[in-house]
Amino acid sequence: MKRTLGIVGAGQLGRMMALAAAPLNIRCLFLDPASDACASAYGEHIVAPYDDVEAALTLAAQADAATFEFENVPPTTLAAIAAEIPAYPTAAALATSRDRWVEKSLFQRLNIPIPAIAKIDSQADLDQAVVNIGLPAVVKTRTMGYDGKGQKVLRTPADTAGTFAELGSVPLIMEGFVDFDEEVSCVAVRAVDGDMRYYDLVLNEHQSGILYRSQPLAAHLLQAQAQDYVQRVMAELDYVGVMAFEFFRKGEQLMANEIAPRVHNSGHWTIEGATTSQFENHVRAVCGLPLGDTQTRGHVVMLNVFGAHPDVTALWRLPGVHWHDYDKTDRPGRKLGHVTITATTTDELAERETAAAACLRNVRG
Amino acid sequence: MKRTLGIVGAGQLGRMMALAAAPLNIRCLFLDPASDACASAYGEHIVAPYDDVEAALTLAAQADAATFEFENVPPTTLAAIAAEIPAYPTAAALATSRDRWVEKSLFQRLNIPIPAIAKIDSQADLDQAVVNIGLPAVVKTRTMGYDGKGQKVLRTPADTAGTFAELGSVPLIMEGFVDFDEEVSCVAVRAVDGDMRYYDLVLNEHQSGILYRSQPLAAHLLQAQAQDYVQRVMAELDYVGVMAFEFFRKGEQLMANEIAPRVHNSGHWTIEGATTSQFENHVRAVCGLPLGDTQTRGHVVMLNVFGAHPDVTALWRLPGVHWHDYDKTDRPGRKLGHVTITATTTDELAERETAAAACLRNVRG
């Protein structure tokens, strides 16, 4: 049986979903305003603004199910599609992850540890929060921030002056500074029938706020703790699809950072590195199919490519190195692709990673 | 740099090439008379007969390089494309594999063991060949046969009468019967610069002349012998791209059966089962890029699906089982898809294969 999956957004995440969907006999139908969007060659493409409800209804009329490449889908678009066909993640799940205050409040309600938080609607709120939480602290816009944008680290009292205006006089959240050991994420998937699968916990390293390196950690001491927290959130939201849950690890305790209600950069390694990729599992979940095995295959690490293209020919010559080109032009800080490195031993992986990293020419934003 | 690869034929082989080409930032442009061909959703598609030279020139004008999904490309189409852009495999390579007599003669010239052969242009030739070669023997059309079609096994003298007319009064080849232990194939790839890579030797099992099961054999005793023979043929033809070389194994000796100048069914396991799939390596080779690592990953086996669709939902529930649906309707003997099974041990593989095989409902042609 041939199925059609509608996807709002036709960037690299949509493209990787379409490539994973093909063997399942699921074709993708994209809605994206950019006629040259990177996924558009791998499915039908409705070229229209994201808030074009007519276009959303056209997509719904032609698809059996729908999903979203990013969390900031206009609510009217989402509602129009969800009124016609199964659409996952649901509006409630997207709304939660779109607003850091709502998101953190959910974690708190589910007894998942989080940093100290304060809701900021004015400079006075901000000044009071500094007193209550102490410095250093991070102030973030409640909505729309990503990759380190829309946030400011406050280190000294002098940093606080004018910060509310500086961040646009929009609703903010302050979070107490966490002196964490590392950042890890748990990519997981939940099916329509409630079945859940979890990938190995991933160690994430950033450069200038952009994810640079993700490596799954086999049999991590905190795997069960992470899964427990993911399970609480997914069950509470009656979530369907792939979710990435980012944590801070401090010793043997995880603290929630944020969720991404979609396939996630820290899960890109699963294409070559897991039995079933996050993209295939997301497609399966939102189309109401059984989930696939999430086991890690051998040793694997992913490096992000941003700003400038790497020495592609050199990368292609390296064994076990997989270059994924998103078909985008160079721009400082822009994600252009990623490199997945597979190996049969940790030594081989380290050697291959060193060789691959030497081919990168990343430029920060 | 974005490249365009022209592909004559838009069936499942073209689709798997397009899916492998996407991360390399290579888009595919198909020429196929069927507007609903299975690959057409994964690239631009020129809908025209294979012998439409105008269409071939349109493809050549838009592509950087070209390749073919099957060996029976009309020579005029091939020549039109090859006059404009690099096109692999070359006309010489395709002509060799298209004609069993030319092919076998090449093996003979390169000192690769083959069964006894005879060239048959009449019933008289056939009768004489039976005397020279003896029975049992196989008679095949020199061109156009595949999957057991266009051939006849002669067991007794009575089988020979009228066989030339029965097979269409076309040029034939007789091959002495080989009482082989098993059939194996070596899938290999050669780059423009002459670099060659070989996948693990594959054990192939047939049902009614259709490949049913392919399993790569790690560290096979005859791996080096197979590679030597493949190397001789590829070097002689100055071959570029993936080639599958099918052999009969009798004890510790390989005997050449035939070559397929393209990605091959006995290499479909490489998508999940090798570091670089045959599809990616073929695309790399014909586009003039460096070749990828051909190492097998873990334990793997492939089962073909033909005639009728399997219990897909049951397949999806099995761990390590990958169902590839070619988006075709059921018809006895028609290849509809394949199932690749991966595992970390041989026991696990055997268990998973048994479970997957139980979901198949293959119908022979």
Image (spheres, coloured by chain):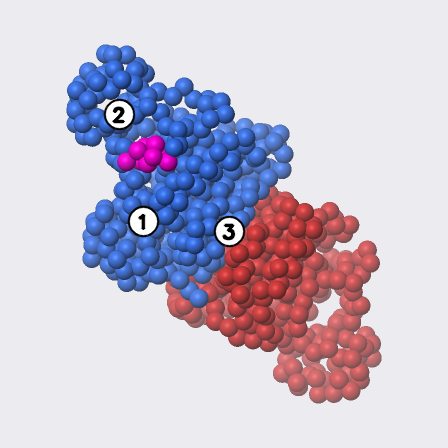
Chain colours: A blue, B red
Over which residues does the magenta segment extend?
A102-110
In space, the residues marked 1 and 2 are separated at their CA atoms by 27 Å
Main secondary structure found in the magenta portion: helix
Chain letter of the residue carrying label 3: A
Give, as a three-letter code, the residue at label 1. Answer: Thr
The answer for how far apart the CA atoms under marks 3 and 2 are is 40 Å
A62 sits to left or right of B259: left
**Which residue is denoted by mark 3 in the rendering?**
A292
Residue B118 location in percent, x, y? Answer: 75, 73
Q: Is residue B63 above or below residue A129?
A: below
Q: Is residue A71 visible?
A: yes
Residue A90 is tagged as 1
Residue at 25 percent of width and 35 percent of height: A143
Count up the numbered dots.
Answer: 3
- Residue B147 position, x and y percent, is 62, 70
The answer to which quarter of the image holds residue B180 is bottom right
| Disc 3 + disc 2, Cβ < 8 Å | no
Circles 1, 2 touching at the beta carbon (< 8 Å): no
